Image (tube, rainbow, N blue to C red):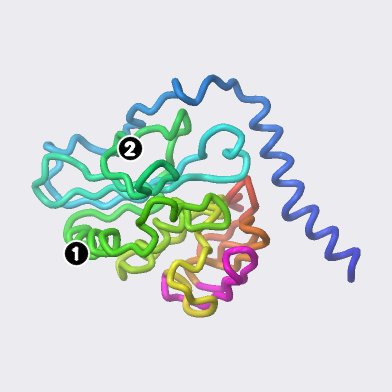
């Protein structure tokens, strides 16, 4: 049994992290301060798009940390509004940043993926709740941000997603910090409300839900299975579909 456990640890955790490190080493890199943060073209021109809109984006984080982790943020636009509002949670100063970056901008060179997309009436219904959760977020003071195991950017976005009934999605396995118990509870329903999870302070955890699938969290690294859309979830590499 011990040998099986060690083999599983190597195959499911250490090997994917090693592969991600090799991919990182093979990519051309420059100074993060001059990295591209321009629009990735994922959002329509706001003045030409009248309906309300909600997006959750996720992209590989800065420098070597991108081997393991991604950074998530939230973008909203009320119906008829001419601009987007972007919300990030960072380690710099007061952690909740509003409109500090381009709404669909590359995260220091990394192109984001869309995790959640709500439009029209569905988005309009979700936006007041999103803004209320952000305004009352419990870790909003300077110094509250903790890169590992949380609360970090992914903890912040996971808390917002969990509070909005219309958002039935989960952050990627690479979103380290998403499993930090932002509500103070170590056992309860999953953020989507479709299952249960046990969470030991973000260091260890087990999740089973229809939306989240089966996830085993070891020191923030998540491995598991996507049940709705068959795929394997791997630390550092993320979702590998069949």
73 over 101 or under it: above or below = below
Point out residue 65 in the picture as x, y percentages from the top left corner.
59, 39
How many residues crowd around disc 2 within 10 Å: few (fewer than 14), some, or many (20 or more)? many
Q: Quadrant of the N terminus?
A: bottom right
Q: Which residues are magenta?
A: 192-209
Q: Is residue 186 visible?
A: yes
164 over 221 or under it: above or below = below
Q: Residue visible at 56% across and 50% down?
A: 174
Asked whether residue 201 is drawn in magenta, I would say yes
Point out residue 26 in the picture as x, y percentages from the top left corner.
67, 25
Res 186 → quadrant: bottom right
Res 127 → quadrant: bottom left
Point out residue 85 in the picture as x, y percentages from the top left corner.
23, 45
Could you tell whether 35 is left or right of 227 in the image?
Answer: left
Q: Residue visible at 35% across and 62% down?
A: 160
Secondary element at image label 2: loop
Q: What residue would you read off at disc 1?
A: 125
Name the residue furthest left: 80
Q: What residue would you read off at disc 2?
A: 104
Q: Main secondary structure of the magenta part?
A: strand
96 over 165 or under it: above or below = above
- Whichever of callouts 1 and 2 sits on the residue coming sooner in the sequence is 2
């Amino acid at each position: 049994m011990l040998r099986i456990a060690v083999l599983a640890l190597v195959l499911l955790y250490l090997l994917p992290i090693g592969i991600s490190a090799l991919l990182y080493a093979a990519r051309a890199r420059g100074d993060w301060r001059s990295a591209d943060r321009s629009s990735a073209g994922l959002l329509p021109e706001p003045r030409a798009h009248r309906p309300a809109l909600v997006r959750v984006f996720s992209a590989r984080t800065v420098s070597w940390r991108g081997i393991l982790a991604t950074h998530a943020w939230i973008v909203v636009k009320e119906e008829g509004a001419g601009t987007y509002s972007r919300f990030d949670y960072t380690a710099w100063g007061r952690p909740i940043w509003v409109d500090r970056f381009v709404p669909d901008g590359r995260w220091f060179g990394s192109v984001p993926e869309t995790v959640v997309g709500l439009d029209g009436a569905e988005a309009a219904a979700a936006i007041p709740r999103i803004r209320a959760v952000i305004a009352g977020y419990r870790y909003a003071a300077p110094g509250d941000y903790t890169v590992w195991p949380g609360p970090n950017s992914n903890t912040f976005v996971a808390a917002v997603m969990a509070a909005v009934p219309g958002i039935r999605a989960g952050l990627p396995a690479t979103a380290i910090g998403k499993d930090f118990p932002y509500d103070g509870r170590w056992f309860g329903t999953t953020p989507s409300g479709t299952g249960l999870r046990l969470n030991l302070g973000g260091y260890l955890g087990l999740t089973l839900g229809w939306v989240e699938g089966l996830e085993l969290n070891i020191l923030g690294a998540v491995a598991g299975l996507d049940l709705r859309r068959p795929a394997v979830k791997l630390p550092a590499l993320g979702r590998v579909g069949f």
